[in-house]
Image: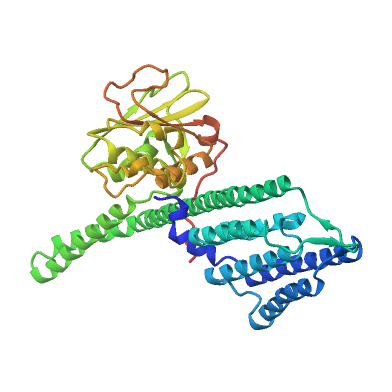
């Protein structure tokens, strides 16, 4: 995945976020401030300014705002060209006002960076660069070309040349720094938002599959007795109709179709097991369920239970949460994809914690990216691609989804390269690749063994 700056879907959505009403309200605030400032400058500070021209320039903004109110609906979403036009007009309007009121000698000249801030958050890179460059050019021209500020007595108000140059440098730096900073921040926010949305979609999909599996499991449970009755009755009929071959064939066909229905329900039931009796399962059973889609992909997957029964007790029984299974499945998929021949899934527990490690014999994570694994949309530096997975440009979104889902369940996730083990000494000589360790506080993951009432019969589905 590329960074959000090159993420077309997000950029297109972001440009259509802003409403015309928002711009109209902001411009009314700016117009009010400009009128108040002009009034104070003329009547309180006794400055001699080109009042008519200044009010004419402000009047243009008033007219455009009034036109926008009457010509367009309040909920109109602005296109990129419309936003660019509005921002460019506001920048030129402010530039003319500064020209009429002392140029960079005017303390309000710093406001010229406002359009750049808006463009950084609402426009594409080309438009932002254009407006930033235009702002710097206009600021440079205002150092030499402007109508000086005068008092009523005719004295010219201007700051020393050194401060004027410093003011120009400060505005240029502010345009560049704040433009880049705003762009960077909005990119990070958008990237995280898009990644979290993908996480929620993945979790919703997993939940739907689990719910579907529950329906199938309930159907198999409820239909088991009728199918067994049909099977038994059809078999007896087939044996009693030996003298009537045509009817016997029909009875045999009924028996075969009953078997087929049983097989179909069993195969469908493998996908999801969220039956009332299966909402909790031993830790190793959950790990095996997570790894099941990748068992026949040409790589050996070895399950290693460090301690079946220890002083910490028997194997913990945990809740079969869809987000945990989906996240572990993502991590196992990543290990299988990059392993040479073998993947190890190690489970361990004690009185306080439960730990799962997923290891492989591949090349491991790039060392320069170890500290960034788990961030969305990161990519390999230099555009290096793995020959075994040419479609993968990076490890960003999948691992981000897995890490986010696991952390929401209370887990702590760490990414390292092998060989490594829980006690800091080599544990598997063949583990040369990536090692993902997931640790939970046992009480947060283990099934709560409070008195559980009998589940009773399956409740009817409400559709």
Residue under the point 62% across and 50% down: 172
**Residue 244 visible in the current orientation:** no
Instruction: Give the left or right position of residue 243, taking residue 154 as reference.
Output: left
| Left or right: 405 in relation to 178 | left
Identify the residue at horizontal 64%, vertical 65% (top origin).
Answer: 91
Q: Position of residue 347 (x, y in %)?
A: 39, 29
Q: Could one spot residue 417 in this view of the protein?
A: yes
The extreme bottom residue here reads 71
- Seen at 28% across and 21% down, the residue is 429
Q: Position of residue 86 (x, y in %)?
A: 61, 70
Instruction: Look at the image and name its color scheme.
Output: rainbow
Left or right of residue 218, residue 47 in this image: right
Foreground residue, 292 or 437?
A: 437
Q: Nearer the viewer, residue 16 or 353?
A: 16
Vertical placement of residue 158 versus 309, above or below: below
Residue 265 in which image quadrant: bottom left
Quadrant position of residue 307 = top left
Residue 106 image point, x, y percent: 76, 57
Which residue, as the protein is rendered here, is positioned at the far front?
A: 154
Number of marks: 0
| Rendered location of residue 331, percent (x, y) | 37, 40
263 vs 102, nearest the viewer: 102
Q: Residue at x 26, y 47 (%)?
A: 390
Q: Nearer the viewer, residue 67 or 216?
A: 67
């Amino acid at each position: 995945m590329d960074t959000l700056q090159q993420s077309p879907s997000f950029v297109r959505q972001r440009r259509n976020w802003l409403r015309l009403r928002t711009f109209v309200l902001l411009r009314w605030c700016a117009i009010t401030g400009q009128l108040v400032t002009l009034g104070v400058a003329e009547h309180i500070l006794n400055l001699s300014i080109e009042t008519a021209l200044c009010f004419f320039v402000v009047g243009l903004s008033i007219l455009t705002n009034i036109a926008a109110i009457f010509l367009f609906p309040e909920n109109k979403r602005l296109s990129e060209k419309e936003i660019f036009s509005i921002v460019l007009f506001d920048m030129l309007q402010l530039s003319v006002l500064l020209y009429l009121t002392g140029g960079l000698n005017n303390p309000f000249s710093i406001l010229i960076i406002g359009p750049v801030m808006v463009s950084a958050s609402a426009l594409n890179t080309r438009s932002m660069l254009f407006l930033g460059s235009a702002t710097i050019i206009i600021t440079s021209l205002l150092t030499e070309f402007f109508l000086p500020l005068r008092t009523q007595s005719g004295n010219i108000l201007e700051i020393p040349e050194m401060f004027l140059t410093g003011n120009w440098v400060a505005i240029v730096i502010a345009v560049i720094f704040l433009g880049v900073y705003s762009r960077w921040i909005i990119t990070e926010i958008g990237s995280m938002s898009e990644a979290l949305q993908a996480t929620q979609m993945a979790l919703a999909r997993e939940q739907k599959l689990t719910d579907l599996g529950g329906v199938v499991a309930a159907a198999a449970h409820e239909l088991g007795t009728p199918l067994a009755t049909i099977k038994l009755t059809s078999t007896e009929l087939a044996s009693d109709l030996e003298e009537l071959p045509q009817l016997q064939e029909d009875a045999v066909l009924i028996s075969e179709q009953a078997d087929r229905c049983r097989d179909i329900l069993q195969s469908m039931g493998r996908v999801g097991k969220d039956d009332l009796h299966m909402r909790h399962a031993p830790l190793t059973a959950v790990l095996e369920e997570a790894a099941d889609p990748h068992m026949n992909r040409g790589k050996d997957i070895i399950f290693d239970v460090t301690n079946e029964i220890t002083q910490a007790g028997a194997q913990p029984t945990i809740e079969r949460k869809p987000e945990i299974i989906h996240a572990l499945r993502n991590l196992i998929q990543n290990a299988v994809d990059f392993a040479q021949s073998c993947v190890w899934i190690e489970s361990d527990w004690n009185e306080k914690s439960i730990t799962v490690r997923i290891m492989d014999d591949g090349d491991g994570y790039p060392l320069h990216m170890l500290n960034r694994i788990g961030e969305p949309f990161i990519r390999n530096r230099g555009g290096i691609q793995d020959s075994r997975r040419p479609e993968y440009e990076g490890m960003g979104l999948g691992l981000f989804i897995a890490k986010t889902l696991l952390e929401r369940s209370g887990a702590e996730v760490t990414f390292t390269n092998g060989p490594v083990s829980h006690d800091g000494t080599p544990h598997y000589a063949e583990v040369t690749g990536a090692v993902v360790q997931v640790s939970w506080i046992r009480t947060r993951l283990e099934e709560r063994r409070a008195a559980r009432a009998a589940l009773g019969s399956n409740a009817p589905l409400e559709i």
